[in-house]
Image (cartoon, helix red, strand yellow):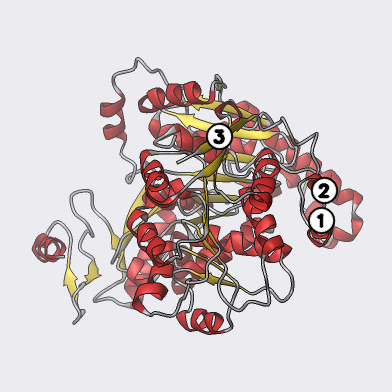
Amino acid sequence: MTEITKKIDANDTSDKIKFSDLGLSEKMLSKIKAKGYEFPSAIQAWVIPLLLNGDKDIIGQAQTGTGKTAAFGLPVLDRLDSSIKDIQVLVLAPTRELAIQVADELKSFADSDTKIQLLYGGQNIRDELMGLKRNPQIVVGTPGRVIDHLSKRKTLNIDKLRYFVLDEADEMLNIGFKEEIEEIIQFTPKEKKVLLFSATMPRGIQDIVHKYIKDHDKVTIERKELTNSNIEQKCYKVREWDKFEALCRVIEVEFDFYGILFCRTKADVDEVASKLMNRGYKVEWIHWDIDQKMREKTLARFKNGSIKILVATDVAARGIDVNNLTHVVNYSLPDNPETYTHRIGRTGRAGNKWEAISFVSRKDSRMLSWVEKTIKKTITVEKLPEVSEVIEFKKKRLIDNTKALLENKDELNYVDLAKDLLETGEASEVLAAVLKEGFGKEFCSTHYSDLKEENFSNSRDRNERSSRGFAWVDGQRRLFVAKGKLDWFTPWSLIQFIEKESDSKLWDVGNIDIMREFSFINLSDNDADFVLKKFKDLNPRKPLIVEAKRDGNSGGGWFRSGSSRGGWFRGGSNRGGWFKWNWRRK
């Protein structure tokens, strides 16, 4: 086996070589120009000529967001024969979102008579079968769905394949697709060109290379360039349980926050997103427990700016490519430095300079050091904004927004109401009352929790955290709701359900936990009293919402059995037998 490796700096070629220098056809160059591109990225500048002019397989190693799709897509489309009705190109991607993104980018450069078919779990199988019958030249899919069509349904034929592309190969291995990849390779013809692209080269990738890839060229972006110099990286050292309050302060002092917030687990995503939503932020979230169509709609709203904050796990966020993000936030540091570079590579694109923020607790200190060593850069430790700074910033923003509205008099639809209000008292006192009605304690220091910078030598973290307890909060009451994930409930839909059934607005919502068959929600005393009474009136014998107790689960409420027969069982500390027996049985 012969391997030719080219290690290049990300900035070595982009200002010297144009797309017109790479050997692409005039038709393809016109499409590239129509999209506003002139200079290729480093991976594109090296891979495109190798793919157009060489006969070897190609391995490309570069970070997410460097243009790997165009690196293989442009030359492959340029050499594609659309008159042939066989599948000539198969692209495997680790996630549905990334597969959709790859297909969309290929379509943007393809001729009108080139057919591209998407295959991924969650999509209507009938639509896929109809699409395959139309004889596509290119198939883009996830390994599991491709295997389903190849070996189970026998509806996919790749005997005439010319190009086999593994995109984000390291992520496919992380998800556990190695066996599927090797099985798919068995269906491909011996004479084909293999193109493998990955941000890292772990042992599993090297095994595939040695086993299935013949003589090849390898293009590697030097590790020192794996983090974009346009990205300002900084971190805040806080206690684990103070992260959310710290996050809110950081968001509040930004004029136009638009970013992705990464969490390690789907449970963290649910918790953080629901708490942000309860604070009034425009936020949505994605992970694998959310229906595929819902994820696609969420991503579409995030990309068009309808929502400004997206909370996600790493795998669910693959395929998100938004050029005008202002921030990427590591609510928790990832498990390895490579994932960190993937995350922050989603911002700072197109020459813009933006921020990557990490919240670092004491237990994250070693990972922070590992990340800094890997990226060969010290991440600046910043001081959290003080409450006074947050309040002053919010006041300034309110004043600026008010000035903007005054300049645009067409937006003033409340002049008559304002005149009526001013007749009730002194102008300043009337305005103060309106501000209190609209903002509550938002401009008061008592509205904010006290935060302390993380002390890494502090050994009392565990005891202090357990004494505080997240579910039970002073000034709030915790309610048990006999509906959960089986009822398709999310934190937002739970709030909507309670407001609709009680015919009232919830003003002070705290933590929300959505379980499989039931949920918990924290409410203020006034809201809790009102909701409990309403649901007791609706169903005196079996109210759907009751007060939870610290020493039990439902506090004497009702919850639905998970058996096929259904039914209702009494729960709580008094009669916990049925509850515990059913829970363990499942």
Earlier-in-chain disc, 1 versus 3: 3
Which element is circle 1 on? helix
How far from the left and from the top, in percent, is residue 76? 65, 59
Q: Name the residue under label 2.
A: 20
**The quarter of the displayed image where residue 473 is located:** top left
Discs 2, 3 touching: Cβ within 8 Å:
no
Q: Mark 1 points at which residue?
A: 29
| Residue shown at 17% from the left, 59% from the top | 572
- Residue 405 visible in the picture: yes
Discs 1, 2 touching: Cβ within 8 Å:
yes
- Residue 305 visible in the picture: no
Q: Which residue lies furthest to the top in this view?
A: 457
How far from the left and from the top, in percent, is residue 251? 61, 39
**Amino acid of disc 1:** Leu
Q: Is residue 269 above or below residue 397?
A: below
**Amino acid of disc 3:** Thr
| Residue shown at 66% from the left, 60% from the top | 105
Using a 10 Å C-alpha cutoff, classify the residue at mark 1 as few (fewer than 14 neighbours), some (14 to 19) or many (20 or more). Answer: many
Q: Mark 3 points at which residue?
A: 5
**Gap between marks 1 and 2, in whole Å?**
7 Å
Q: Residue 162 carries which label?
A: none
How far from the left and from the top, in percent, is residue 531? 40, 64
The quarter in which the C terminus is drawn is bottom left
Q: In this view, does 180 lie above or below 268?
A: below
**Amino acid of disc 2:** Ser
Using a 10 Å C-alpha cutoff, classify the residue at mark 2 as few (fewer than 14 neighbours), some (14 to 19) or many (20 or more). Answer: some
| Mark in front: 1 vs 3 | 3
Which element is circle 2 on? helix
Of the pair 117 and 257, the residue shown nearer to us: 117
Which element is circle 3 on? strand
**Gap between marks 1 and 3, in whole Å?**
27 Å
The quarter in which the N terminus is drawn is top left
